Image: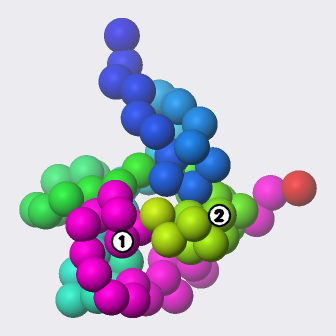
């Protein structure tokens, strides 16, 4: 059975293979597709809507235990807009 993770944006549970791990490096949110970068990670669907929800809820700071602002522009261009 595949591990299940919770998306920090929409808060729905999904198999790990359908989510993208993200980590913070020098206050910039970066994608970790191989899930091997050191540090605390958060999981989310690779869609703009989940990124927007996570930003609105300020979920990245809590999930990654980082204070201050987190720049999400680096991964925003990698995400798919659904709907």
Query: Where's residue 69, x and y in %?
Result: 39, 89
Q: Is residue 25 above or below residue 56?
A: below
Helix, strand or loop at disc 1?
helix
User: Where residue 16 sits in the image (x, y, percent)?
Assistant: 41, 35
**Residue 79 in sight here:** no
For label 1, count other residues whose C-alpha is less than 10 Å away and answer few (under 14), some (14-19) or many (20+). some
Instruction: Name the image quarter holding residue 54.
Output: bottom right
Tell me the residue that label 1 is attached to: 61
Whole-percent x, y for residue 68 in the image: 33, 88
Residue 46 rendering spot, x and y as whole percentages: 57, 57
Label 1 vs 2, first from the N-terminus: 2
Return the residue at label 2: 53
Check the picture and name the quadrant holding the C terminus: bottom right
Look at the image and tell me whether residue 82 can be seen: yes
- From what the image shows, is residue 51 above or below residue 2? below
Span highlighted in magenta in the image? 60-82
């Amino acid at each position: 059975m595949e591990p299940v993770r919770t998306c920090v944006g929409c808060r729905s549970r999904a198999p790990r293979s359908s989510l993208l791990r993200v980590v913070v490096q020098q206050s910039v949110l970066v994608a970790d597709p191989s899930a091997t970068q050191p540090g605390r990670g958060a999981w989310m669907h690779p869609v703009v809507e989940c990124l927007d929800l996570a930003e609105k809820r300020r979920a990245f700071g809590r999930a990654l235990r980082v204070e201050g602002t987190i720049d999400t522009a680096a991964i925003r261009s990698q995400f798919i807009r659904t709907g």
